[in-house]
Amino acid sequence: MLSIENLTKVYPTGDRALENVSLEIGGRETTAIIGPSGAGKSTLIRCINRLTEPTSGRIVLDGTDVTSLNKKELRKARLDMGMVFQEYNLVERLTVMENVLSGRLGEVNTWQAFRRQFPPDAVEHAYDTLETVGLAGFEDKRADELSGGQRQRVGIARAVVQEPKILLADEPTSSLDPETSRAVMELLTDIAEAENIPVLINIHEVDLAVEYADRIVGITDGEVSFEGEPDELVEEAEDRIYRSDSVSKTGRKGNDDEALDNLGTELREI
Ligand SMILES: Nc1ncnc2c1ncn2[C@@H]1O[C@H](COP(=O)(O)OP(=O)(O)OP(=O)(O)O)[C@@H](O)[C@H]1O
């Protein structure tokens, strides 16, 4: 169970990205965080494993107060929090298998890591996980030979072999085409069930959130503006979440789209 308690983040620039955010995430539920651009979604995900340091508040994972850990303790605690990134964060010149096993690096010493000596159960788990994510047979391919969707599958497999207590995903579909995005969302929700862990996803596309998530959390101007099941996300709730936004919500025309339309009209008139 992950408890986020009164989380506040103020960047050194003075930007108040999060204001007293409290949430509980548990079971094997997929929670989607939606909201306008700049609302604080990414900051929220990154504060959980302290890739971004919270200003105040607490993050408690299965009884461990992550916010109070020193560097060494934090490295260990991060093994419990698998992270999937928008840009995959793979080591391009390493193979798929090496990238996946890097999820277990925290468990072996430097010499073992250098000799690529991982425990046999880790290697077996990596093979199984590659099969789960649809990449059986890709073990020896280099990461830079893969498509975006395949890279993201490697990123997910790397997070899963850590055997985390929670999976965090920061815009995992933003660099992917719609069909691949759906496949990745399906995979993440399947993993939540199979591994019996909660998955927290920062996602731009409301339609994907509604289709795949069990629960939706709306963030607006750094605060929780909605919390509920996908079918509770009626138009009024969406308007509340996106009240100050014009571009991020899928399916709704924003200022940029309108500006492009106007430009098109003007060009046709010349
Ligand atoms: N490193 C930083 N330094 C200063 N301000 C930052 C930093 N990162 C984010 N911010 C600010 O914090 C606020 C929240 O940003 P964040 O990236 O968390 O939003 P987001 O909802 O994930 O946006 P998007 O959907 O566009 O990625 C914004 O006002 C942003 O400008």
Image (cartoon, grey):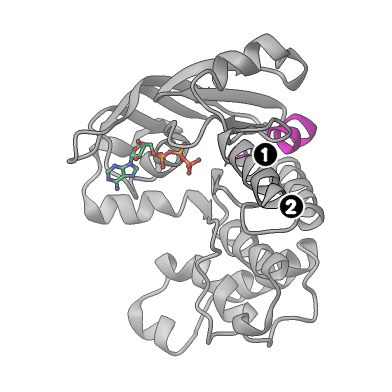
Q: Quadrant of residue 49?
A: top left
Q: Residue furthest front?
A: 270
Residue denoted by label 2: 181
Give the amino acid type for the residue marked by disc 1 in the picture. Glu
Q: Is residue 154 above or below residue 212?
A: below
Which of labels 2 and 1 is toward the front?
1
Label 2 amino acid? Ser
Residue at 49%, 85% (x, y): give it: 116
Q: Position of residue 112 (x, y in %)?
A: 41, 83
Question: Which of the 4 quarters of the picture holds residue 129?
Answer: bottom right
Task: Determine the secondary structure under disc 1.
Answer: loop
Q: Is mark 1 within 8 Å of ligand 1?
A: no
Horizontal side, residue 117 vs residue 53: left or right = right
The magenta segment? 196-212
In this view, 237 is above or below 100:
above
Residue in the picture at 78% in, 17% down = 231
- Please give the name of the residue rendered at 54% of the width and 50% of the height, measured from the top-left corner: 164
Q: Is residue 262 above or below residue 173?
A: above
Which quadrant holds residue 149? bottom right
| Mark 2 and mark 1: Cα distance apart in space | 10 Å
Mark 2 vs 1, N-terminal side: 2
Mark 1 sits on what residue?
A: 205
Mark 2–mark 1 CB contact (< 8 Å) = yes
Label 2 Cα neighbours within 10 Å, binned few <14 / some 14-19 / many ≥20:
some
Q: Is residue 159 above or below residue 74?
A: below
Q: Position of residue 245 (x, y in %)?
A: 52, 27
Relative image position of residue 28 (x, y in whole percent) = 68, 34
